[in-house]
Amino acid sequence: MKFFELQLTIRSFLEKKHYFFITYFFFLLGFFVVPSVHWHNNFFYGLILFPYLITLQLERIQLISRSNIWILSMIFAIYMCLTLLWAENVVFKDYVYYLRRPVYLFVFLSLTIDLVLRYPKFIDCLFIFFCWVAAISAIVNVFWLYSSFPFPNYRLSFLGGQLRNPVVCAIVYGTVALICYFHVTKWQKSYAWIYTGLCVVLLFTAVLTRGRGPLIALLVTFLIGAVLTRNKKLLAGVLCTMLVGGLMLFYIEGLKQLFMSPRSIFYRLEVWKLTLERIKDVLIFGEGISTEHTFIMADGVKLYHSHSVYLGTALQGGLIGLFMLLNILVFTLWEGFLYFLRENDFTYVALFLFSVMCITTVNYSLMNHPNALWINFWLPLALIAAKKLSSDTAIKSFYQNLYQAKPKV
């Protein structure tokens, strides 16, 4: 009894001080400004994960578990880690290392959903925060990098440890650009011109990274958004961008060399071929989450992952793991589309659709320590799950009774 009383006291104190609201935003800020991935991850473990677990309220988790998206995500996470049981050369420290990952995901998804349900203006605060932090960090990094390296020959990378890879930068800044255009400019009409300017900055930043996959995914997302929202100006802008961009790549040799490196494209095709050859031997269950992801190209160059989350998931978890992932994607996109039909807000569909396309050509796994895919994939998924839950009468009643005083946020 003393433990539960202490737990209740700690939880009441933290919630009264809006502790998780504040630390959550600092955690997201860290993606853009913290130079060390190790520091950033430790912030999450020590100041978010541990306090959240020791103050966990079973009733809230029971309500959150009404989300099919949340359940499918947790089943996928647990299955992928259980693939250790048939992986080769697994030692005890591997179990400790990988079995923590479902816990990370559990805390991040549950906390995100909980914050959305508790604070009515949480998503608005989150999106505005992302727009300003991303835009300011982009401007600082552009001036910092190109004051020392030639413009535009050097690919844009960032001071933040989580965003040092240019392709990852393109994914994160593309995500925020979608937020800025589809949500903030719509709901902050008095300041639409400011956020339109921020959106341009973010899009220009994504272009400077020269991440082909994310840029193509971004264009396709804007194109689909223009068609579904019947936005003629956006449609014209996207088509003109495609036409002008295509002509410039075709006629300007220097630009073609910057964006269309044949070696990079051939490496990606080769690593996909090598990954498929390994998948054929472990088609149903995969090699396990701890499997070696080093691939040696024909010219001796080493690549350290499959450059595709879909192929990486199939290699680790077999067709079972891939089916689970595809099930999550289809269900989440469907829920996001239904929300778009109800509320005429394309933001959530845009974010998750962009992510679904991006993970085709980047990374190898969604089961990781905190990294940029948390912003690109798991965050939009959690927001869609929260939007679905927010229409549940029992959940509304629970949060209204629990927090009779409206949070001043």
Image (cartoon, helix red, strand yellow):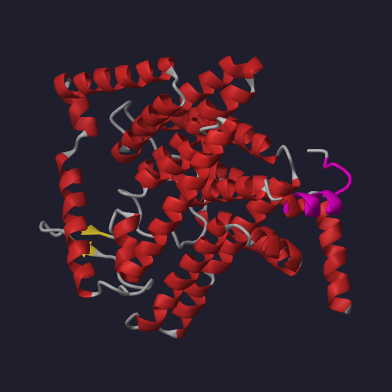
Front residue of 269/133: it is: 269
Say which residue appears at 46% left-offset and 36% top-offset: 350
- Left or right relative to 316: residue 406: right
Residue 33: x percent and y percent? 56, 42
Front residue of 393/142: it is: 393
Q: How many marks?
A: 0
Specify whether residue 14 is in view: yes
Q: Quadrant of the N terminus?
A: bottom right
Front residue of 24/322: it is: 322
- Left or right relative to 335: residue 326: left
Residue 8: x percent and y percent? 85, 66
Residue 156: x percent and y percent? 38, 35
Q: Quadrant of residue 83?
A: bottom left
Residue 140: x percent and y percent? 51, 30
Q: Residue 404 magenta-drawn?
A: yes
Q: Quadrant of the C terminus?
A: top right
Say which residue appears at 55% left-offset and 32% top-offset: 345
Front residue of 282/142: it is: 282
**115 shown above or below 242:** below
Q: Which residues are magenta?
A: 395-407
- Left or right relative to 333: residue 264: left
Say which residue appears at 47% left-offset and 46% top-offset: 334
Specify whether residue 204 is in view: no
Magenta highlight: main SS? helix
Residue at the left extreme, as displayed: 298
Q: Residue 156 magenta-drawn?
A: no
